[in-house]
């Protein structure tokens, strides 16, 4: 009974903390239903709710100020963010897994030196790489294209590091047994190591997906066509020198995060157990 | 595992197919696409539709989100820039030319009827030319004026500003009309902030500076001149307006106000809502004010249909504005800045020759008709003082008259090839920000620091470019006068 | 185990290595080389070697030291965000389910109903905002009691979901000195005590908590108070405490062998002593990882906030080194100078990381 009381108090505390965290989002939800002049009012809820905001963002209703449909293409931006994130995640997981295998299960000369080099580059400020990467993209003619958005993000030292930690704890006996049966390294990789590393793969996938969905700076310099914009930079278009339509941005953001929340809830157990198994050792 | 990889691959393939399908459709063959990077002014669409109608071999498209300085430079230098783009602030033209992203149209200008000397307002000569070469043509020109909110003045019982006021009289008048209302909100005297760049920048001091016909450089452009009486007076008046008269908000306060949403140029909306008694603006404000007035009229209609509201709230206001010329200094002639919304052609664009057709259009009567409802066309031959009146309370004819009158006495500062105006703006803006953050700082001291910083920047430019240094030595030796009038 | 041959390793490493070379190594070399030239984005300027010029300019640049100060200042929030993540993780770890499931259901139903009724009551008596908050509280409580930590973790992770501009816009609204929720809240709380308070200037103010120290005026030392820097730090802490750091701590906590806890329990150790002597040392690798990553991130941070929220102002108060690099590279088009700043930043990051590595190696068991 006493333990239950403690548990109850824990819940109480959690809810209290949660409200502090969630208050801005309550405001955001309320603001997404407000008509424009009410944004400046101090209230969480609108006085004259305008659910049409969502329709306006989705280009199904005209913007009350101009009387025309918005020129902005929110659904396309959503698709772009999703498309780019899906490709980046798949490529990153694949290449990181392959490389992690090379660093953990194969032995070759210079293995550890190269690995340390990889680790070292994680410390380099990404801004150092941003400017030359942009020039490289220009030379390759990949500016303002999907490929240009995806390719540089498809390789990650962090991903390699993470998966290596997972693979390195697996017993060697599996590899040796398979090799004695005549399996080549590729088969060992695909059929034995990868399934065992599943928690790590899922963890990396979730972190990469969520991270890439929000990536701001790289699309900012790479994207020029409105039809290519991803969500974070698409939202910038709601702020013109003709004013800022905060309520539309809030509506767009609510539509943005709801699926991500669902994804997170569903994947949560995998994420936590994945990080747990990998562990941050040494 | 193999199954998983295969299904992911299939999923990606499907997604890619969808992405390819969703790509914007290609133009029919024989039609040249032109991209115009500008702002999303609602009137643009009508102008563009008309242009595409008279030029079936071209398809002009508005790109509303990419016209800010960094994006133009970065994109154009990387080969993905627009075909034509707006120069948002006069000082950017020089920066664009030095960066190599503005096409020199001096040779083609006369033949196309867009020559700076004969087909555009003399006041904005320095806005479309640089070092004797022409780089663009205006999509609209104007000068700043004082727009005042008659409702606010009437409520406070203060007489409207007139066109012959001195700065002293103007600030006194503003002091009477501004203040804090019973509900805690603040009515400011006038606005101070320019949004053409990325960040809001204070420009009240600039308005004062221009009314003294100030210059940032010596006539031969070899030395910056910011440590002058003109600048000192300008900064002092700016500080006084904030601290002594308390009619001007600080730039950071304006930043806080704009974040509240509101459609229309942020200062314009605040003005229409009654937070500013006057704003330093121009006829272009009409582009957003009209939409705002319509919203207000709709609200009045709702009020009239709702007896419940009529009992609890007073009748909602509809904006009424008046216009006055900018103040002047007593004993000095009237002077103000002439501004141009210049359109420039990208020299790396494969369609630059066709883009000249667009500049021709900007100088034409057809365009003038489509722009006169909210701006003054760049071609003085087509500027019509009798523009149509849609709303008598928006002072459209007076706006046009005042703009044209100001343009006759307007000017632009001379530019120097050795130091970008862009850098001068940046340094001075930083000093103004410091002054606003800490009004106890001495204006003279701030300007002296700015002067030395700019001189150092000029020396840095010379040290990095030997050709420029040679030109500099030549100028200094011969004491030549700069080629700009 | 026989060593593998090169070609096999290359096959696996290949794609990753290629990407690494093209998108990491080459830019690194280019940027390093570029910092010794007058590399500019302007096509008209011919590229030529400039030696140590950029670095010399850097060390004489007053702005550089100012922005370095800003960068370190903003990192003062790190202990709070990491500590906060640890606190949340500790709270979320452990029992959340009740002895008998039915008790849990009944509690959930009860709390849900109470919240709903009080919310309705508040609504009807004219406080719709409070009603909204209470309803949300009830919703979270019900979900939390029913589903345990999953619900709370999601709630704490929320700040990570919105992309880019939205969170920043949200907080700009909240920080509005006149109409923002935060100052309004402060004013209402103060009014309850009978005080009339104006509320801090937040993004419009150059004051800072360290403003009482005799910094040079160049650092726009506006005096003591809550200004733009504090606003950004608060926003950062809010965003970081429920995020990946918390998840990492949770995983670390789960990896602490329960036998150690039981042994300590049997020795009569209280909760705090158990934490200090069992949990904390076991968490050391996780904490180390988080601190290192956070410091690396912190030194490179502040860009988005500066670019979208404050434009580096007021009067440069929120310009960090990364924003300065962006300004130099993309606004002044001076990539050579921007690269030099970036490499000085790298040396800082590397140095600090090395320092932390050595420190950890020295006292191994803390």
Image (cartoon, rainbow, N blue to C red):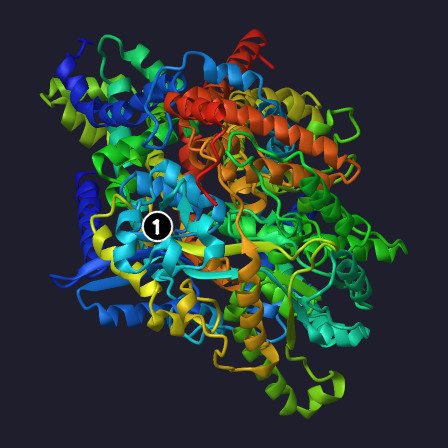
Q: What residue lies at 46% left-to-right and 56% top-to-bottom? A: B122
Which residue is farthest left?
A182
Percent x, y of residue C134: 67, 62
Q: Which residue is mark 1?
A: A81
Percent x, y of residue C109: 61, 64
Q: What residue lies at 55% left-to-right and 41% top-to-bottom? A: C305
Residue C216, by quadrant, is top right
Percent x, y of residue A142: 24, 39
- Which residue is at the front of the view, C57 or B339? B339
Q: For label 1, count other residues whose C-alpha is less than 10 Å away and answer few (under 14), some (14-19) or many (20+).
A: many
- Which residue is at the front of the view, B45 or B328? B328
Is residue B440 shown above or below C299? below
Determine whether, in the image, residue B361 is placed left or right of residue B14. right
Is any atom of residue A227 visible in this view? yes
- Which residue is at the front of the view, C146 or B20? B20
**Kind of element beneath mark 1:** helix
Is residue A120 shown above or below C109? above
Q: What residue lies at 57% left-to-right and 11% top-to-bottom? A: C359
Which residue is farthest right?
C194
Quadrant containing the N terminus of chain B is top left
Is residue B185 shown above or below A214? below
Is any atom of residue A22 visible in this view? no
Q: What residue lies at 45% left-to-right and 12% top-to-bottom? A: C52
Percent x, y of residue A233: 41, 50
- Which residue is at the front of the view, C198 or B480? B480
Determine whether, in the image, residue B245 is placed left or right of residue B387. right
Q: How many marks?
A: 1
Q: Chain of mark 1?
A: A
Determine whether, in the image, residue A144 is placed left or right of residue B223. left
């Amino acid at each position: 009974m006493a333990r239950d009381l403690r548990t109850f108090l824990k819940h109480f505390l959690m809810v209290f903390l949660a409200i502090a965290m969630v208050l801005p989002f309550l405001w955001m939800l309320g603001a997404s239903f407000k008509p424009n002049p009410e944004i400046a009012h101090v209230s969480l809820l609108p006085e004259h709710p305008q659910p049409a905001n969502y329709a306006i963002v989705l280009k199904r209703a005209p913007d009350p100020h101009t009387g025309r449909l918005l020129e902005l293409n929110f659904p396309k931006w959503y698709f772009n963010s999703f498309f780019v994130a899906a490709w980046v995640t798949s490529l990153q997981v694949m290449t990181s897994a392959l490389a992690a295998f090379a660093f953990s299960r194969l032995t070759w000369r210079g293995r550890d030196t190269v690995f340390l080099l990889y680790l070292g580059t994680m410390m380099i400020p990404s801004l150092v790489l941003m400017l030359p990467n942009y020039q490289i993209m220009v030379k390759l003619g990949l500016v303002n294209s999907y490929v240009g958005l995806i390719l540089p993000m498809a390789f990650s030292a962090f991903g390699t590091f993470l998966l290596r930690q997972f693979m390195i704890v697996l017993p060697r006996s599996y590899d040796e047994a398979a090799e004695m049966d005549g399996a080549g390294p590729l088969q060992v990789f695909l059929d034995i190591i990868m399934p065992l590393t599943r928690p790590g793969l899922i963890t990396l996938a979730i972190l990469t997906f969520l991270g890439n969905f929000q990536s701001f700076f790289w699309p900012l310099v790479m994207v020029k066509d409105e039809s290519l914009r991803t969500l974070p930079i698409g939202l910038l278009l709601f702020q013109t020198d003709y004013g800022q339509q905060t309520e539309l941005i809030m509506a767009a953001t609510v539509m943005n995060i709801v699926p991500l929340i669902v994804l997170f809830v569903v994947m949560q157990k995998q994420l936590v157990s994945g990080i747990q198994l990998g562990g941050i050792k040494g | 595992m193999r199954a998983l990889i295969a299904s992911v691959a299939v999923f990606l393939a499907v997604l890619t197919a969808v992405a390819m399908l969703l790509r914007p459709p290609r133009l029919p063959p024989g039609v040249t696409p032109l991209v115009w990077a500008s702002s999303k002014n609602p009137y643009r669409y009508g102008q563009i539709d008309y242009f595409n109608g008279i030029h079936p071999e071209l398809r002009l498209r508005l790109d509303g989100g990419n016209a800010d300085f960094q994006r133009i430079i970065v994109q154009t230098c990387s080969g993905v820039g627009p075909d034509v783009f707006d120069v948002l602030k006069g000082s950017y033209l020089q920066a664009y030319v030095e960066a190599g992203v503005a096409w020199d149209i001096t040779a083609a200008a006369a033949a196309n009827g867009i020559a700076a000397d004969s087909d555009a307002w003399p006041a904005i000569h320095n806005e479309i030319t640089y070092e004797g070469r022409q780089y663009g043509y205006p999509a609209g020109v104007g000068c700043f004026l004082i727009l005042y909110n008659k409702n606010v003045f009437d409520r406070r019982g203060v007489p409207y500003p007139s066109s012959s006021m001195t700065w002293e009289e103007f600030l006194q008048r503003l002091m009477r009309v501004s203040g804090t209302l019973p509900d805690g909100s603040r009515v400011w005297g006038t606005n101070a902030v320019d949004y053409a760049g990325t960040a809001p920048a204070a420009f009240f001091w600039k308005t004062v500076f221009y009314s003294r016909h100030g210059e940032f450089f010596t006539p031969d452009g070899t030395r910056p001149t910011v440590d002058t009486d003109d600048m000192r007076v300008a900064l002092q008046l700016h500080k006084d307006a904030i601290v002594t008269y308390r009619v001007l908000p600080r730039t950071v306060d304006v930043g806080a106000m704009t974040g509240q949403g509101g459609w229309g140029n942020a200062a314009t909306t605040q003005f229409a809502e009654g937070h500013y008694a006057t704003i330093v603006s121009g006829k272009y404000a009409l582009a957003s004010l009209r939409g705002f007035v319509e919203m207000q009229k709709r609200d009045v209609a709702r009020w009239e249909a709702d007896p419940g509201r009529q009992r609890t709230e007073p009748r909602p206001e509809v904006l009424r504005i008046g216009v006055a010329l900018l103040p002047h200094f007593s004993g000095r002639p009237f002077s103000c800045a002439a501004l141009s919304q210049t359109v420039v052609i990208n020299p790396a664009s494969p369609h630059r020759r066709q883009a000249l057709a667009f500049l021709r259009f900007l100088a034409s009567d057809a365009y003038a008709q489509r722009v006169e409802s909210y701006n003054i066309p760049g071609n003085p031959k087509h500027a019509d003082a009798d523009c149509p009146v849609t709303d008598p309370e928006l002072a459209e004819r007076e706006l046009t008259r005042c703009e044209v009158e100001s343009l006759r006495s307007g000017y632009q500062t001379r530019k120097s090839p050795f130091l970008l105006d862009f850098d001068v703006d940046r340094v001075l803006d930083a000093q103004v920000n410091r002054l606003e953050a800490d009004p106890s700082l001495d204006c003279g001291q701030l300007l002296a620091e700015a002067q030395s910083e700019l001189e150092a920047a000029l020396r840095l430019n010379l040290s990095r470019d030997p050709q420029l240094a040679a030109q500099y030595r030549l100028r200094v030796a011969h004491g030549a006068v700069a080629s700009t009038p | 185990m026989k060593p593998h041959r090169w070609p096999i390793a290359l096959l696996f490493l290949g794609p990753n290595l290629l990407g690494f070379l093209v998108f990491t190594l080459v830019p690194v070399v280019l940027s390093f080389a570029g910092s010794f030239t007058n590399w500019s984005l302007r096509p008209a300027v011919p590229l030529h070697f400039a030696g140590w010029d950029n670095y010399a300019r850097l060390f004489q640049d007053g702005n550089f030291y100012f922005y370095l100060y800003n960068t370190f200042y903003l990192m003062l929030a790190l202990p709070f965000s990491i500590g906060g993540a640890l606190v949340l993780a500790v709270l979320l770890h452990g029992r959340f389910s009740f002895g008998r499931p039915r008790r849990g259901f009944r509690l959930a139903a009860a709390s849900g109903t109470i919240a709903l009724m009080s919310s309705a009551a508040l609504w009807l008596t004219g406080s719709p905002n409070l009603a909204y908050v209470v309803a949300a509280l009830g919703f979270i409580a019900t979900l939390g009691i029913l589903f345990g930590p999953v619900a709370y973790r999601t709630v704490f992770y929320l700040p990570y979901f919105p992309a880019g501009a939205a969170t920043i816009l949200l907080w700009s609204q909240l920080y509005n000195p006149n109409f923002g929720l935060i100052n309004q809240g402060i004013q209402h709380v103060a009014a309850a005590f009978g005080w009339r308070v104006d509320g801090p200037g937040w993004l419009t103010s150059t004051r800072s908590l360290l403003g009482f120290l005799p910094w040079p005026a160049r650092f726009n030392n506006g005096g003591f108070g809550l200004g733009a820097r504090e606003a950004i730090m608060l926003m950062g802490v809010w965003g970081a405490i429920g995020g990946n750091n918390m998840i990492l701590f949770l995983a670390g906590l789960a990896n602490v062998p329960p036998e150690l806890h039981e042994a300590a329990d049997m020795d009569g150790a209280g909760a705090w002593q158990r934490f200090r002597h069992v949990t904390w040392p076991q968490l050391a690798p996780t904490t180390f990882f988080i601190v290192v990553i956070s410091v690396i991130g912190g030194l490179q941070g502040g860009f988005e906030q500066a670019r979208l929220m404050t434009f580096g102002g007021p009067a440069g108060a929120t310009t960090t080194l990364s924003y300065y690099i962006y300004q130099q590279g993309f606004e002044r088009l001076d990539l050579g100078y921007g690269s030099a700043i970036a490499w000085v930043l790298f040396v800082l990051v590397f140095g600090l990381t090395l320092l932390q590595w050595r420190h950890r190696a020295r006292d191994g068991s803390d």
